[in-house]
Structure formats: C-alpha cells, structure tokens
Image (cartoon, rainbow, N blue to C red):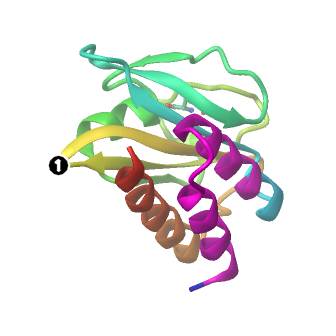
Amino acid sequence: MSEIKKRLSSILESPNHHTDDKLQKVCHLLDQEIPYFNWTGFYFKNGDKNELKLGPYVGAETDHTIIPFGKGICGQVAVSGETFVVPDVKAQDNYLSCSIETKAEIVVPIIKDGEIVGQIDIDSHSIDPFTSDDREMLEWLCEEIAKIL
Ligand code: SME
C-alpha cells in the first residue's frame, strides 16, 4: 500500500474522532501532500432532498454550499454514480465555477449499500493534472470512507 493510503487509513481507523473530524483530516492530508490539489472537499446528500450539501473541505470558501442533483460536475456525479474527471473546466457547459483559478476538477462518488451518498471533489489550478494513480487512490479512499459512514 502506498504511503498516502497508509496515512489515510490511519485517519479513518482512528477510534477517537467523529466522522466529520476524520474527513476534515483527510482533506488536510490530501491538500498538503498533493501540490495540484487546490480545493479538496466533500459533499453529501442533504437528507431526503435531491441535492448535495457541502461537508468538510480545505480551500477557498465556496458559494456552492447546496448543489441540486444534475447541476455542475458534482450534481452530475450525484446522478451517475461514476467518477468524473474534467481535465479542462472551460470545455464543460454544465459546470459551477467556485474560483476563477480552477482549471480542472475530479469528483468521485461515495457509494454505500448501493446508494450514492456523497462524493469527494477536488479542484486544481493546473490544467489536466490528475493521474490514473490519483483516480485509483481517490476511488479506494471513497470505498474506505463508505465503510465508516
Ligand atoms: N465545480 C463544482 C462545484 C463545486 S466547487 O468546485 C467546490 C461543480 O461544477 O459541480
């Protein structure tokens, strides 16, 4: 297992923290360790509503604290349940801009018992920065997170 996965696992396994504290630590770790992760955060389904609500994050404050299903990259992932990698946000019509500095985005769903319950969202200030290793690590992370929800 890679060093970063080991450190993520130890955060998620820690018995003395609530889930939101763990997710906040996950954001901090990813933000610190991967230079082109420039906004790292979680969105979760808002109760029974067909919308996402902002959870723990690290990065600039965002206006998008609530995102209806289907809107933006996040809203599309809430419907598809599939990882969405956007190498260049300018090429997307259905996109919600958080910061003019954002050039690329990756959103990975968190699926628990077959239901899409949330997602991790990462914005980058670089064009096309995300590697297949990043995607694999984030998909692994979301599976590990689903286990503690
Ligand atoms: N860009 C996202 C909105 C969330 S912010 O990036 C934090 C989208 O299009 O869904």
Label 1, on which residue?
114
Q: Position of residue 67 (x, y in %)?
A: 44, 19
Residue situated in front as seen by the camera: 112 or 61: 112
Determine the residue positioned at 55% across, 57% down.
Answer: 12
Q: Is residue 18 magenta?
A: yes
Determine the residue positioned at 74% across, 56% down.
Answer: 29
Q: Position of residue 24 (x, y in %)?
A: 67, 41
Q: Position of residue 98 (x, y in %)?
A: 66, 25
* Direction from residue 13 to residue 36 in the image, left or right: right
* Direction from residue 120 to residue 128 in the image, left or right: right
Is residue 126 something that shows in the picture?
no
Residue situated in front as seen by the camera: 68 or 142: 142
Q: The residue tagged with tag 1: helix, strand or loop?
A: loop
Looking at the rendered structure, the kind of residue marked 1 is Gly
Quarter holding the N terminus? bottom right
Residue furthest out toward the bottom: 1
Vertical relation: 141 (above or below) 62:
below
Q: Is residue 133 magenta?
A: no
User: Which stretch is magenta?
Assistant: 2-30
Vertical relation: 21 (above or below) 99:
below
